Image (cartoon, rainbow, N blue to C red):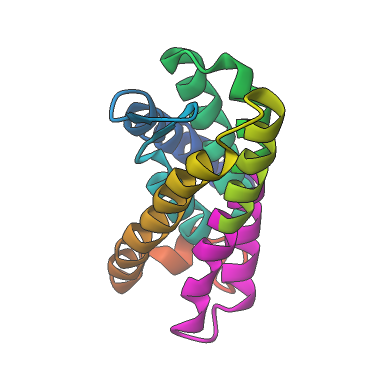
């Protein structure tokens, strides 16, 4: 098997496994809040994958787990918005992380940008779907988005200390 095929299989398998983990944390560890949404822990996995594997993989994990979580939890009206929100979160986090990788501490600004984009998309969704209560629901999204960003940073930092983080990223010079 060629190296590129092997890498593609590893990446695809990683996306599937992390999507399943993020789905479990989204659909079964959720806390509903007033205004039409719910707090969940699946975004930790999406942000982690965006920074460790890369932006495409993070976007896929977020879109798959988030939309399936919405479907399971009975929030099917939000699925299109969730796909856009999680893809933007994964892509922006992953790309900014790669750009800032050489700057040791500054690179961890990236999950906060991703969370901000997710919050903005959901704010628009609340305005369209429920019409009122946008600010209350968005306040809970801020807790989720920024809280999960904070929790993802030590996970990525610990993973990088193992040396595996660099070998999994597509932008690595070693690959």
Tell me: 75 left or right of 162: right
Residue 63, horizontal then vertical, whole percent: 58, 34
- Most extreme residue toward the front, as rendered? 132
**Rendering coords of residue 94 (x, y %):** 59, 60
Residue 146 quadrant: bottom left
- The stretch in magenta equals 87-115
Q: Position of residue 172 (x, y in %)?
A: 57, 70
Residue displayed at 41% across by 38% down? 18
Q: Quadrant of residue 130?
A: top right
Residue 92 spot, x, y in % from top left? 65, 58
The quadrant the N terminus occupies is top right
Q: Is residue 9 visible?
A: no
Could you say which is closer to the camera, residue 103 or residue 128? 128
Residue 108 in the magenta stretch? The answer is yes
Q: Is residue 101 above or below residue 165?
A: below
- Identify which residue is drawn at 64% across, 75% down: 99
Q: Quadrant of residue 82?
A: top right
* Residue farthest to the bottom, as pictured: 103
Residue at 45% x, 40% y: name it: 14
Residue 55 shown in magenta = no
Measuring 56% from the left and 69% from the top, which residue is drawn there?
A: 97
| Residue 171 left/right relative to 19 | right
So how many labels did they put on this image? 0
The reply, left or right, for residue 49 in relation to residue 171 is: left
Secondary structure mostly seen in the magenta stretch = helix
63 up-or-down from 56: above or below:
above
Q: Nearer the viewer, residue 119 or 151?
A: 119
Asked whether residue 59 is in view, the answer is yes
């Amino acid at each position: 098997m060629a190296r590129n095929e092997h890498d593609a299989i590893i990446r695809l398998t990683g996306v599937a496994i992390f999507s399943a983990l993020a789905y479990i944390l989204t659909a079964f560890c959720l806390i509903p809040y007033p205004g039409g949404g719910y707090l969940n822990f699946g975004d930790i996995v999406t942000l982690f994958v965006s920074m460790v594997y890369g932006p495409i993989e993070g976007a896929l994990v977020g879109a798959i787990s988030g939309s399936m979580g919405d479907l399971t939890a009975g929030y099917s009206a939000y699925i299109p918005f969730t796909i856009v929100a999680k893809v933007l979160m994964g892509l922006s986090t992953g790309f900014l992380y790669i750009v800032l990788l050489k700057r040791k501490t500054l690179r961890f600004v990236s999950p906060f940008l991703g969370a901000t984009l997710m919050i903005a998309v959901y704010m628009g969704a609340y305005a369209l779907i429920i019409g009122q209560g946008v600010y209350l629901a968005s306040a809970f999204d801020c807790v989720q988005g920024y809280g999960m960003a904070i929790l993802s940073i030590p996970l990525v930092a610990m993973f990088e200390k193992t040396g595996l983080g660099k070998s999994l990223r597509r932008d690595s010079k070693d690959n």
